[in-house]
Amino acid sequence: MSYTALVEHFEQLHHLQHLGAICGWDQATMMPPGGNEARAEALGTLAVLCHRQLQDTHLPDWFAAAEAESLTPEQGVSLHEMRRAWRDANMLPADLVRARSLAGSRCEHAWRSLRPANDWAGFLPLFEEVLNLSRQAASARAEALGLSRYDSLLEQYEPGMRSRQLDQLFGNLGGWLPDLIRQVQDRQRNEQVLKPDGPFPTAQQKALGLEVMALLGFDFDHGRLDVSAHPFCGGVGEDVRLTTRYDEQDVTQALMGIIHETGHARYEQGLPAHWRKLPAGQARSMGVHESQSLFFEMQLARHPAFLARLAPMLERHFGPQPAFAPDNLARLYTRVEPGFIRVDADEVTYPAHVMLRFEIERDLIEGRMEARDLPERWDQLMQQYLGLSTKGNHKNGCLQDIHWTDGSFGYFPSYTLGAIYAAQQAAAMQRQLGPLDRLIGEDLPAIFGWLQQHIWQHASLLETGTLLGRATGQALDPAPFRLHLEQRYLA
């Protein structure tokens, strides 16, 4: 059967991608600095091998023959997702794939030292090469798909989403979010919030993080926690690699980073094992992926009921102090204050960080601005959206994120889409199971069971709109997100 041949072929591709994911994790966590050039070349070669696997000349004939076979509905979807992967690979020549992999590895590796040094001048030529190659890839994809250059990249992360829809969505948010931020800040102005008194040794922070991961159902037989310059979740479903970064003067941020990445990891671990090696068994989209991490971090972990469970853990690891009182933790983790760093942002100002990046990356890819203009444009939009200036402060401005270093343009909208999806899922879950405070306090497994049933087990077997509609009863809608923020911060 041709479908059987396709399954075997794509399972081989999965094994190559598995190796690439673990090599990439090692590059970000364990690899000595002197190994980067050799690792970059090895990953470039591996990227070409994966690309060639998707350009195998047998595939068109196998696809055509498989369509004539008697397939189950799920196998039919699987065939469609294989075709999507094949289509995407055939848009780009192998030499461009290799060049992008090399440039991304070099830029990302250099970023780890250039960002702390605030060295924009050193970063710029590396970034210009990444941007140039990303534009070439976007042009090739745009021509093949009949889309704009930016939309052709957006399609990689959120299939079916277009920038015109994002303009409408962000326009909706922009219509009410600034006023909400002002209202919440006015309400919180006279609140007394105690910051935990450090230091907080890294080893103890990691021990706390592992305990919280266990509470959240992470499977340590199929994953681990490490340290990197920028938190991420990588690896594969059978072997999920989480990372965070620690500040020994601040216990709050690393912990939320761990919880965020645990949401990603639970999704990966919850994908159906029998589909895991095929495109249909992968995560539906990055917006859906971010909805899981943001459900864990925002809907769940910042809820007063969860913080009440967290308080005794903090005391066990760091000793009692007034800042660890549940009511103070609730004020601390719902404090709304515009800041420079996206990954440290509260959930009310977070969308502003995403809108800023969306505007910039679209203009970069479409050729409406150049890499050298990035610091000035970043400063302009930070002042517009958050009232902060990053002039000369590159490490907390345009150098703060890892995504563009490897050419991941089109990814950032996934964060706000994820926040909206997460709010819709939380609202639907509570309609079916009852209020979150009871579930968090008494039955956390019921929460994970709902996510498994409605999100995780479907992988890419359903399109995003269908997945969201079946899980929540509605299409993409920012109204539940707005209601969530108003109830948490103004009620």
Image (cartoon, rainbow, N blue to C red):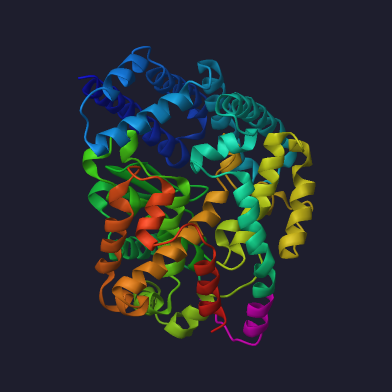
Is residue 30 in view? yes
In the rendered structure, the answer to whether residue 445 lies left or right of residue 353 reads: left
Residue ID at (51%, 79%): 487
Is residue 250 in view? no
455 shown above or below 102: below
68 shown above or below 219: above
Query: Residue 322 appears at what percent x and percent y?
Result: 47, 85
Query: Residue 312 appears at what percent x and percent y?
Result: 35, 78
Count of number-bearing discs: 0
Residue ID at (57%, 34%): 152
In the rendered structure, the answer to whether residue 140 lies left or right of residue 67 reads: right
Q: In front here: 427 or 68?
A: 68
Question: Does the segment drawn in magenta span residue 186?
Answer: yes
Question: Does the segment drawn in magenta span residue 289?
Answer: no
Query: Residue 116 appears at what percent x and percent y?
Result: 64, 48
Q: In front here: 12 or 226?
A: 12
Query: Residue 43 appears at what percent x and percent y?
Result: 45, 25
Residue ID at (40%, 63%): 425
Which picture quadrant has residue 326? bottom left
Q: In front here: 11 or 257?
A: 11
In the rendered structure, the answer to whether residue 216 lies left or right of residue 491 reads: left
Q: In front here: 252 or 71?
A: 71
- Work out which quarter of the rendered image holds the N terminus and state it: top left
Region of the chain picked out in magenta, as a range: 182-196
